[in-house]
Amino acid sequence: MNSLSGRFLILTTVFVMLAEILIFVPSIARFREDFLLNRLERAQIASLALLADDMLADDLEAELLANAGVYNVVLRRDEVRQLMLSSPIPDRITNTYDLRDATPWILIRDAVARLFTPENEVIRVIGEPVKDAGLLIEVTTDSEPLRMAMTDYGLRILGLSFVISIITAFFLFLAVRVVLVKPIKSVVGYMQRYAGAPEDARGIISPNSKVTELREAEEALEQLQKELTQALKQRERLAQLGGAVAKVSHDLRNILTSAQLFTDRIEASDDPLVRRMAPKLVNSITRAVSLCESTLAFGRAEEPAPTLTMVPLRDVADDVVSSELLSVTGGCVQILNEVPEDLVARADPEQMFRVIMNLVRNARQALVASAKPGNITISGYEDEASWYLEVKDTGPGLPPKARENLFTPFQGGVRKGGSGLGLAISQELVRGHGGDLVLAETGPDGTRFEIRLPRGGGTF
């Protein structure tokens, strides 16, 4: 019964039975009231027979009481209480029930109490005579016949309720299979066929359900499949293009390397024009070789999953500052580490070193290119959800064109001759931690990048 229709069948049966039980309680209370009123009516008929003939034989009087199912009958007429029929009472009277002023709650309470009282008791029942035959009629009777009748009636009601619930659940089961389960299985079938061959357009679902919610799900699945198919085709084309670019880059690197060997001889030429143009040629070839090597490295790179440990971020920042200061000459650029000493985050120390190093190096190169002194500051803080690291510089800011493709490989380069891979790789490493690397702000006063690492397992 793990299927949707099977569970629906069980729940329907349970709820129908629950509804029948809620109906059963007032029904059994009404049955008890009718049973006792019937006893009063039969006792009244027996007492009227005595009024018609004051001299009834004892055996006839006993027969009237037996037919009425009571021990004695008291009738109040004209404010006079008369014992009309009587016989010996086998035991004391245990309870008295007045049906004249009984509310529904009292009737339900008394009915439930009688069902759970198996012992026979002598009870007194008071009611109003029918046809205005007096002011009050009172009888004494045994409780056992009443309880047996109530039990029999209750069992028949419960049996009928069970049959009704089974029939109702069966038809609802069929309805659910037709209206819900069958369309859902159809959607699952489309998903399985599509998963087996996502490039086959025949696996894309065609919405046809008449149920609003299912049709919305089918339309959403259709849109998702179309977008995914398009993305897979684009990815395949990019993979093919990447393979071709890698081959071209490999061959081009070999050609440029060979050309680079000849530049040494060109630099030794006696021709002043050749010697003046040689450095530019060397720089151009060097940048071309560097671009080819970066392209090949990016195509081969498969970053491993980060090894997460609790890392003091200030120590990682200190290593970055120590390494980068070796490249600073003339004191035009200052690198400051303002990460709090107690800031400890869950991260891979080697990958975080690469990320921070890349951001600091980009900032240093931007400051050097501007030919103005400036500062680079590494800072950090935390809140209840995340740890944060910031790398801020006082450089000239990023041009609008660079912001548009900042994290796109081969397109986000800012420095002349750069490959545009550093920030793309850095963002990939941070997202491997479940966090993100974003450009927080940039402008004439400088640029600030923000690294966010989540405390939990989710992403931003």
Image (spheres, rainbow, N blue to C red):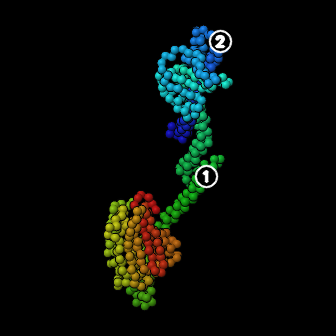
Label 2: which residue?
Answer: 53
Mark 1 vs mark 2, foreground winner is: 2
Q: Residue at x 41, y 58 (%)?
A: 456
User: What kind of element bears circle 2?
Assistant: loop
- Closest to the observer, 247 or 224: 224
Task: Give the image quarter of residue 334.
Answer: bottom left
- Residue 67's spot in the image, x, y percent? 59, 15
Q: Residue at x 57, y 44 (%)?
A: 185
Using residue 401 as the reference point, say whether residue 391 is left or right of it: left
CB under 8 Å between callouts 1 and 2?
Answer: no
Q: Is residue 204 visible?
A: no
Sooner in the amino-acid sequence: mark 1 or mark 2: 2
User: What kind of element bears circle 1?
Assistant: helix
Label 1: which residue?
Answer: 216
Q: Residue at x 68, y 24 (%)?
A: 131
- Closest to the observer, 429 or 117: 117
- Closest to the observer, 381 or 125: 125
Using residue 260 as the reference point, say whether residue 35 is left or right of it: right
Amino acid type at circle 2 is Asp
- Residue 358's spot in the image, x, y percent? 40, 72
- Residue 288's spot in the image, x, y percent? 45, 75
Amino acid type at circle 1 is Glu
Eyeballing the image, is 104 above or below 250? above
Eyeballing the image, is 407 above or below 73? below
Q: Is residue 268 visible?
A: yes
Looking at the image, the residue that sits furthest to the right is: 131
